Structures are given as structure tokens and as C-alpha cells.
Amino acid sequence: MNGRPERFSAQPNELLVERLRDGLALTGTKVGCDTGQCGSCVVRLDGRSVKSCLILTVAAAGSEVATIEGVTTPGGELTGLQEALRQEHGTQCGFCTPGMVMALGELVDNTAEREAPTEPEIREWLTGNLCRCTGYHSVVRGVQRACSAARGEASAEHADAAVSGQEG
Amino acid sequence: MTAVTGETPLQEAPAAATPAAATTTAATTTVDPPPQDPPLQGSGLLGQPLDSREDPQLLRGEAVYVADIDLPGTAHMAILGSPVAHAKILSIETKAAEQLPGVLKVATAADFTDVMPLPCIWIPGGVESHFPPHPYGLPGARPVLTGDTVRHVGDPIAVVVAETPRQAAAALAAIAVEYEPLPVVTRADAALAEGAPQLHEAVPGNLNAYWTCGDKDRTDAAIAEAEVTVELDLVNQRTINSPIEPRGAVGDYNAATGEYTLYASTQGPHNHRFLLSALVLGIPFNKLRVVAPTVGGSFGTKGYLYPDMPLVLLLSKALGRPVKWVDTRTGLMNSTVQGRDHRQHVVLAGTRDGRITAVRATSYANLGAYPSTIGPGVATALMGRSISGMYDIDAAFCEVYAAFTNTVSLGAQRGSGRAEAAFLMERLVDRYAGEIGMDPAAVRRKNLVPKEKFPYDNGLGWTYDSGDYQLNFDRAMELSQYVEMPARKAEARARGKRLGVGIASYVAICGVGPSTRMSKEGMLGGTWESANIRVHPTGEVTVTVGSASTGQSHGTVFAQVAADELGIDPAQVQVYEGDTQKAPYGQGTYGSRSYSMAAPAIALTARKIKAKLVKAGAVFLGVPEDKVVYEGGKVHEEGNEENAKTFAELAMAMWYGWGLPPEIEPALDETTHFDPPDFNYPFGTHVAVVEIDELTGETEVVAYTAVDDAGNIGNPKIVLGQIEGSILHGLGQALMEHAEYDEDGLLVSRDLNHYALPRAADAPFYTLGKTTTPSPHNPLGAKGAGEIATVPPAAAVVNAVVDALSDLGVLHIDMPVTPEKVWRRLRGESQ
């Protein structure tokens, strides 16, 4: 769990999100819909993003689980993706945000080795996460910015876009 | 599309302003530089796109929402909602549930007989209203738990408190309730028909209120004499706001002090404190503290009183432990207020050459089973007084029949009332333009309220404060490249697609409000807003406000306002809100009011601080008061900047209070209660371009242009996000969202598998612009912004779809515009 071993017994019907929130006090992972639709509960399981309300705790035994709490230290430095989302204000009420960071993290992490995702690809990737506040535009801009940074590109283009965005 | 007529200036609009990217589909928003902005106030901080200081903790998952609050010893509550829409309760058997593991208490209505019902505080003003009663003679609302009759699916009947959430939920299944089914009605017009099922004894014929505004005789006469009249029957379907965070509440009773604390996902903690203490629990106001932690979206729904709020408090007292309740998504959909839901017959009259002479609307509003906290006002005044939109119309009249039905209570929804009004008016304008063979843009342009007519009385009860509607409208035409549309239609046709263009303009009443004026609308309570500024001895500043953010970055923007006015670094300013024990009174965040209500309160308070520092500065600088200048965060002697004291020095000096004359109190701690002279009226024009697939009937929004005017904007980065999100919310209603009840009153769209919300791939390309007309009704020149862009999109999209299908004789299509509906129309089936 976030790089630390955790040992516990779980009921067979316990959901991973219940263990995270109620058992381990990792409340950064949110519950928004109970049916796997909203993506607020996304965590990384062996590097892949999964909805923790759709997986039993026992099914995660022996796997590496990463939650939002494992991404940064409290009050510490933001990751490239988080920093890019901050600059683009890709969050409003913030409830869907941890799930988005976990889901998009997989996309951004993998971008260094291959071509940067196109905008439709980013939107497709985001389809598993619902946000009611932002309309997703600022999130998409944040991912574009983060991917540029991850690929070591000068992010001048996106910086320009951000400046014009501020005129709204 | 018909030819642009000679009167319009559109052909003169420069076409070069929009980037070529506007013709592509999936791309991020572009924003044009504002054509003309007035000078910024204060030190120039306002208007700057400062980063949101709330964002880092949200991005780290560190913000605490209600579900994350874990007080020692907490027990967990679950609510049993009715599975049927209308029935008499014959018996409730709870013994089996009480004996289950972990169960601490099972309670029904019989346990809460001394608790008053949850009141409704916005009754339609000036008319006779019928409500279920409240002991204070108020228009009462719903009981905390239902004892005799259930009136909608989800109507709360019983609660269980257990050691764990799972135990509480499991015990619900062991409560046996015997129902005697009653007939069900879910439509407002059907509920008013002879012989309809009756919901409340105190409400004859299910009619809560018959409310009107405008001049009926004049309007009827204008319609009778008109050269042209057009009519439409419209359904503004019921939708669900769907904040991603479901509601939650934690009650904590302290037996030692007799004090109650409620942590709740609320957008109005002070208001909830007042209503719950005085009007529901019957406890002293000063024994209840309400705390709003981080709130995960609201869009209007979290300003309402719900049964869970008193229940967690009462059960905490009964059990001697904190009691926590967190809703499920299905629970939210069956209990949290829903929005829109009007069935309307609307008429517009005009001349053959495009001058609108009258508009009349008859609306059947579905209030649901009980009057929610302010739902009846939303369904009447907020909608009806807005129907004439941006147009200068000689005669207008609106009547609303507000009815009770076996559905979830009606409440606010992003853009509430105003979106329903814009929908009916903007559909009518297009229908009228089609009837007289004139371009819809030209008709609009011809009827806009001219600049020189402000303040403008719209004849329906609103007096628009300020605006340049022509400038705004022309900007939207220019940015959307409206003159290019005929060519784009031909190009789309060649690809086998039908392209349609829809315009929607709007005026949105915001800045609620002038308290006396709201009292005339039937609002039971003041609607002012307040702010306190406390300057600490070290020069740091704390701002507290009565407002409460549900994701609007108040901590960032309000610090900006105070820093701007005081001429200091915003990093010196900390903002607190949301806790009734710490924040000054206020009414909360709703109706896009925070920036035009709380921010002016902050600015006015900062001015009090400055005025005091000028007085004290005269003492400290040893010069007469009229020679003291406050500038750039310090005071100095006029003409002598050497003789000066900085803000930090002044703060410390005021903390010590040495040498101050008796007329100057030591310390710097000021409060303002801001009650504006009138509302403010943001406005705008949106243009949707859709393409319809002939084979599938699918509608794709391929371009979307929005030009909104929210007066002076404090932080454009924050407002940009609100505009982008608001548009998608409106598009959701147009294309996919529908709270659908079956004939038994069962909410079919009971979870997110059955209720469609727009996803990232559904968001079209936006071209955004703005105009800026300051409001004269507050010292910042601000107008509401947060939800205004939700007002026109549904009308713009449906106008575009009807435009695309107009050659088939389609005059209207109901929302949501699903592929199936369009497919049927393409094949000649009627609605």
C-alpha cells in the first residue's frame, strides 16, 4: 500500500474502497456513485488505474496499491500532473480530482516513451471520470501541459494557451 | 436558413477574429481578448488570473469532505426511503432490525413527534399559497420522517443507527412496512386535473399556488391585435443536478454544554443554522453550530433543508455519540431536490417585419411531493419574471400553476428559473423568425433592449441594471462566424450531415439580493451578505465571510478583493468561511451571488479599515487628517512620502493602541453587512452549431460560442472554469439528461447507469468571449457569473437541432434531444 506492506483480514465481500477509506483511513479516495460510473475512487493497482468500488479487497491481495496519498507527501511538492492541473485550474470542488489524478497519472507516466496523446485520446482516457464542475476543458489543458513537461518539451505553446485562457 | 435581412448589421461584422480552429470539433476552449475593459479598481489585483490557492490540497486529496470526518465514537445512520410513490403506511415493524448485530437504534416518525416539519421559506409572493402546515404558521414543508402517508419514492420512513455503515444499511432490510397503495400522479398538469390523486389535505386540488406577473390584459390585447402570432407547447424536463459528492451530515451533541454541532455538505451554513434551530428543532439559536467542510459541488442542491440534518443531531443526543450519515448515489437521486420540470404553453406576437410586441407563458410547474426550502419561489418568480430575456417587449405576462405530485421535491439547479425562462423565449423567437421568414439573428438584433434604456423595467418585475446588449450580441455573431453558416451547411450536406445553427440570448437575475425586495417576492428572511476583516498585530489579515464555497475558490478570490482594496500582498490575507461559530452572518452561496454580494462586503469593510487608518495616521504622522493619504498599503503625508507608516507598522500601532485619542478605538476589526439597492443582471449570447447524422439521428455539437457579460470580474481564471463547466451542464440538459418517472412514480433514472451526465468526450469545442458592463449596484461593478452560462445552452442547441430539421417541417423537438427522437423525426414521425 503506497510502498508499505499492510497485513489485515478482510471479509470476502469487502470492497477495496471500503478498506482504503474505513480500514486504512486513506480518505483521499472518494465514493461518488457506488456503480463504477464516476471514477472518484480510482486507484492504481500494479500500475494500472482501477475503480476501487468495483474490486474486492481480497482480489487486491499481493498487489501494489497506490492511492492519492502515495502520490505526494502532505503539503509537499506536487507531481508534474498535479502542478499542470493547478496551473490550468483543472479542479473546482475537487471531489472528483483525486480519482482523476490517479487515472490520468497512468496516461502521463506513459507519455515520455511514446507520442504525446492527442486531445481526443485524453478525452477518451477521461471518459471513466465524471466531473460536474469544470466541463473538463481545464483538465484536458492540464494533461496537455503535463504531457509536454513529461516529454521534456518547452511548454511555451501551452503557456501561451494558458495566458489567453486567463482572459475569460 | 432564410436570408439575412437588410436591417441586420451582421454582414458588416469582421470575420477575421476567430481562429480557424473553431471549425474543428474536439479542441480546448479558445478565448478572445476582451474588446474593451474598464480600468481595474484598487491596486490592480482584481481582474488578475491568480492561481487558486485551494487547488493544491484538492489535488493531493487532502481536503476534508463530510464523508471524511471521523469523530471518536461515531455511529452510522442509514435512512429507509419508501419504495413506492404514494401509499398509506398501515404499520411499521422494527423489532427484527433492532436485534441485528451492531444496531443501536431504530427510529420512526413516532420518535420525533416534538420535532417541527422542515419549513419552506420562499413562497411565491403576493398570491394565496397552500402548504402542508407548520406550527409557527409558516408555510411548512415536509416532516422529518413520514408517519402516515408516503408521497414519493425515497420519502424517508425510518432510520437505523449502527456501529458500522454496513450494519446500518443491512438493518434497513429487516424493517417491515405495510403499505396501502394510493393512486399516483407525476405530472403537474395531470395533478391539477379533476379527479387527480390528492397529496395533502391542506392543499386542495394539489395546487400550491397560482402565480402571475406582467400585464395580462395588455398582453392579451397585443396578441389579439398582432399581425403574427406563434405558439409552442414545451416540456422543460426534470433533471438532476448530480454533484459528484453525494450529501452527508454528521451530528455531534455535547451533553456537557447542551450544544449541537452539525457538519454538513451545505452551501448555506448560517441559513441552515437559523432554520434548524428555530424552526425545526426548537432549540436556542446559540446552541447550534453548523460547519460546512469542503463541499463537493452543489449547483443549488445543497442549500436546502433535508431530514437527515435534524436526524443526525437528534440521534446523537439520544445515543450520546456522534452520528454520521453519508448518502449513496441512488439515495441522492431519490431525495436531493431535482430541477426544471415545467410544461408550458407559450405565445409570442409580433409584426411581419420582426418587431416582437408581446409574449405570454402559461406554465405548469412540478413542485414534487413537498415544498422544498425555496422550490416554490424558483418555479415561479425566478422563472416568470425573466421570460422576456434581452428583448424590449411592450407587453408580457406569465402565469404559473405550481402543483404537488408524487415525485422528489423540486429545487434549484445551476441556472435555475432563468434557464427555463431563456428556453421558452429563445425557442419562441426562432419559431417567430421562421414564421415571418426572417433570420433569427436579425429578429433578435431588432428587439434587443437599447443601451440608452437602462435601467430597464422589463414589465415582469425585474429592472435590469446595465448592459450593452447590441455589443454583446454582435460579438457573439462575429466570434461564431455566423455569416459563414450557409456555406457551412452546404459543406456539411455534402458529407451527409445536416448542420444547424442555434442562437440563445439571456438575461440572468443575480445578486440576491435586496432583502426588502426579496421579501416582496415571498422570501422569509434577509438576503444580505457580510464580511469581517481583522488585521492582526503582525500585519497579516483574516477575512471571514458568511458565504460558503462549493468549489468556487473563495479563499483565493476573496483574498484578492481584500488585498486589492488594502494595497497589500494577497499572500498576507487568509480567508475563512463555512463555520457559523467563526464566520459573520451570511446567507450562503447560491444564485451566483458570492462575488457580487460577499466581495462587495469585503471591499466596503476594507474601506472602513482604510478610513480608520487615515484617522489614526493623522495622529501617527503628526499632520491634519485631510493631509493623510492611504496609498499602496501605507499612509503618508500628502506631498511627503518620507513621512509614512506601512501597513504592518500601522497594524502593530493599532494593536498597542498607544496615543490614540478617545474617538479612535484601538485595533482593526471591522464588519459590513451588504444589502444592495437592487439585483444585478448579467447577460449574454450563445451560438451552437450542431451536425445531425442522417443515418443514426445523433446530434453532435460541433462548435459552441459563448459571449457572456458578468460585469467586472475578480479572477478570470476562476470564472473561465465556471463558464466552461456551466455550458456543459446546459448541453447535458439539451442532449441527454432526464429524471424520468414511470407511471407508478418510480424514478427510472435512479443511478448513473440510468441517468446520463456529460463526459469528457461530450464536451465540444468552445469559443469564448466576453463583454464587460459593470453593475451600478455594488462597489465592485460585479455581476453574477458562476452559473450564468448554464442559462442559454439548452435553447441554443434545440434551436440548432430544429434549424437542421426545419426543411422536414419540424417546428419543435423536446429535450433531451436523443438520437432516437431525431431519428424518428428524420423518418417523418411526429413528436
Image: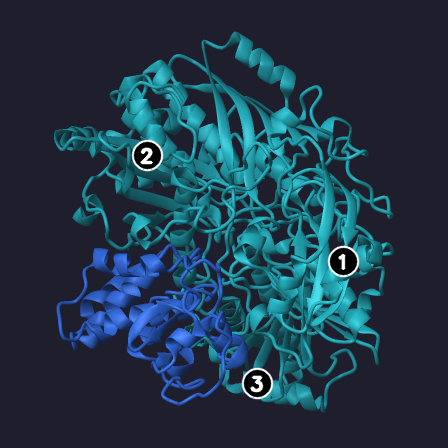
Chain colours: A blue, B cyan
Say what amino acid the circle numbered 3 marks.
Answer: Gly
> Closer to the N terminus: mark 1 or mark 3?
1
Q: Which residue is mark 3?
A: B539
Q: Nearer the viewer, residue B342 or A5?
A: A5
Q: Position of residue B281 (x, y in %)?
A: 81, 60
Relative height, residue B829 to residue B16 (above, below) = above
Q: Is residue B426 left or right of residue B636?
A: left
Q: Nearer the viewer, residue B129 or B14?
A: B129
Pointer 1 and pointer 3 on the same chain: yes
Q: Position of residue A12 (x, y in %)?
A: 48, 73
- Chain letter of mark 3 equals B
Q: Is residue B45 left or right of residue B455?
A: left
Q: Which mark is residue B94?
A: 1
Q: Which mark is residue B396?
A: none
- Could you tell me how many numbered marks the image carries? 3
Q: Residue at x 44, y 84 (%)?
A: A75
Q: Residue at x 43, y 64 (%)?
A: A96
